[in-house]
Image: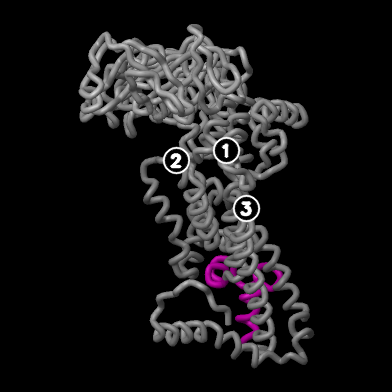
Amino acid sequence: MTLQFRAQLTARNLDVSLHVDDAERIAILGPNGAGKSTVLAMIAGLLRPDAGRAELDGDILFELGSSAGNVWTTPHTRGVALMAQEPLLFPHMSALENVAFGPRSAGARADNARSTARHWLEEVDATALAGRKPAQLSGGQAQRVAIARALAAQPRLLLLDEPMAALDVGAAPMLRQVLHRVLADRAAIIVTHNVLDALVLAQRVIVVDHGHVVESGPTRDVLRSPRTPFTARIAGLNMITGEASGTGVEHQSGLFIEGLGATGITPGTTAIAVFSPSAVSVFRQPPHGSPRNVLPVTITELEPRDEQVRIRADDLTADVTAPVVAELDLTPGTRVFFSIKASAVTIYSI
Amino acid sequence: MRRTAQYSGLPLWLFAPAAAAALFIMLPIVAMATRVEWSQFVSLVTSESSLQALELSVRTSTASTVVCLVLGVPLALTLARSAFPGQGLVRSLVLLPLVLPPVVGGIALLYTFGRQGLLGRSMDVLGIQVAFSTTAVVIAQAFVAMPFLVVSLEGSLRTAGRRYEAVAATLGAKPTTVLRRVTVPLVLPGLVSGAVLSFARSLGEFGATLTFAGSLEGVTRTLPLEIYVQREANPDAAVALSFVLVGVAVVVVGLARRSKEHL
C-alpha cells in the first residue's frame, strides 16, 4: 500500500503534499487550525480540494484542476477508513453490529460478518463489550470498539484524527498500547498534537502549519532536533531506547532507566523511556538517597532559551535556570549527573 | 403538583395568562363533551353513514400517509443533505400548504388534476379521472399533510448531522446502505412523529377535500364532511362524531410525543 497525495484548498490557504509508503505509519503534527483534519477529510473523500491528485496503490482517488480532466471517487470506494476524535459508534447498533458494519457493507453474510467482528473486538480487548450499546460504553471502551470497526472494514489506509484527544488521562495510555499493537505492519496516518502519540505510533512525522508542510522526517530526528518553533515547543523530549526489563528500560551501555508503564511490556523487547528536559535535575556529584534515575553525562552545549538554559549532553537535554548554571559552573566539557524521578519517566514498547 | 428542585425564574403574574391560554384550548372541548348525548352515543357513531365515513377517513388517511412517506422522505432528505440552485425557494414553497387556506389548495388541485386542469386534460385522454373520486380525497389530504412530514423529518436530519453518515461511507457502505442502515434508524423518531402528524392532518382534512373531491356519500364523504352534513340534519350525531375525532386526535398527539421521547 502506498499513497501519493497533493492537494490545494484555496479557501483554507492549504497546499499539502505527502506520501505514505508500504506499511508505514506517519503522524501529522501541527497547531490547532493548521489544516491537519482537512487533509484527512480530503484523503477520505469527505472534502473536495480545489486542485490536486491522490493515488492509492495505483488507483486514482482524485485528480482535480488538471488538464487531463477531473476524477473524483466517492468515499465508500476508496478503501480508506477514518477514525475521528469521537468514536461515532452508530447509537442504534450494539458494539458487535457496529464492528460488523464494514464487512456487511462489503457484502459479507450476517453470520460471517459477525465472526469477523468478534475477531476484531478480541484484537482490541473488547470481547466483553460485544453486546453493549454505545451509550453503555465509556470513552476509552467506545474508542477501542471504533478501532475494531475501522479495522474490520479492511481499509487499505487507516486515518486517525486525534484518537486520544477526547479521552481522560487514565484511558489514553491503554488505547495508545492497543493502537501500537494493531497498527503494526499497517499503513496509517495519525493526526495528533501529542508528541508521545507520534513517537509511539509513527515512524515518520509531518509538521503542518498554516496549511503547509513545514517539516518532515523520521519521528525521532524531527522531535530530537526540531527546526520550526512549533515543533521545538512540543518536542525536545529525551528518549532512551533499550530492552524492557522489569520496571524500566536497560540501555545497551548497561544503564537502567526506571519509569511508569513498563510492567505491561514483555521483558526483552525493545522499549523507549521518555522524559521531558524540565524533569531533569543536574548535579556535579552523584546524588544519593532518593529513588531517582542517575545518568552520568558530559555537557556538549549550553543554549539559552527564554528564562532557562538548555543543557545538551549528546542526545540528552536538561532545562535549568540560569543561577543553577552559574552556581554549578557548567560549561561544555563538564562532567555532570542528570537525575530524573522514576515517576517523570514514561516507558513505551516500540 | 410536582415541584422541581431548580429555580424557575418565572414571574408569578405569568401564570395567569398561561392558565387562560390552557383554558382557551380546553374549554371548547369540555363544552362539546357536555353536549354529547351519551345515552345515544354508541348508536349515533355506529349508524351506517357514520361508519361509512369513519371507514373512508381511515382508509384515505392511511393511503395519504403512505403517499407522504414515499414522496416526502426523499424530499426531506434532498432538502437536508444536498445543495442545489433554488433550494431555499423549494423549501419555502413546500411549506405553502401549511399556511394556505385548504379551500385554496382544493381549487389549485382542481385546476391541476380536474377535467380541465393542467394534468387532468392529458389524464382524461388516457381515461383517468380523479376529481370527485376517492383518489381525489387522498390527493387533497396528501397535499395538506406532506409539509408536516417534510418539516419534522428535515429537522431530525439536521439535528442528527452528517458525521455518522460520513463514517459509514469510509467503512465502505454504499449511499443506499448508509441511508437504510444509518440515516433512517437515526431519524426514526422524527420520521414516526412526522408520519403520525401527517395521518392526523389527513384525518382532519375538510376544505381541500370538499372543493376538490366533493361530498359523495361512501366515495368522498370523510368523517369531517359527514360531521358538517349532519350538523344541520342531526346535530346530536355531529357532536358525537366530533367527539370521536377528538379522541383520535388525543391518541395521535400522545403517539407523536412518545415517539419523540422513546425512540
Pointer 3 residue: B128
Tell me the amino acid under the disc marked 3. Ile
Segment colored magenta: B206-231
Q: What is the chain letter for disc 1?
A: A
Determine the CA span between mark 3 and mark 1. Answer: 63 Å
Q: CA distance from mark 3 to mark 2?
A: 35 Å
Foreground: disc 1 or disc 2:
1
In this view, the residue in front, B139 or A73, is: A73
Element carrying mark 2: loop
Q: Crowding near pointer 1: few (<14 within 10 Å), some, many (20+)?
A: many
Residue under pointer 1:
A140
Name the spot of residue A82 as percent of width and height, x first: 51, 28
Q: Is residue A50 left or right of residue A240?
A: left
The residue nearer to you, when weighing B12 against B117, is B12
State yes or no: discs 1 and 2 in contact (Cβ < 8 Å).
no
Rendering quarter of residue A154: top right
- The amino acid type, in three-letter code, at marker 1 is Gly
Pick the front one: B64 or A273:
A273
Give me the residue at 35% from left, 25% from top. Answer: A281
Work out whether disc 3 and disc 1 sit on a shared chain: no
- Residue B175 lies, with reference to residue B1, above or below; the image says above
* Element at label 3: loop
The residue that mark 2 highlights is: B82
Position of residue B78 measured from the top left corner of the image (x, y, whole percent)? 48, 44
Q: Which mark lies nearer to you, 3 or 1? A: 1
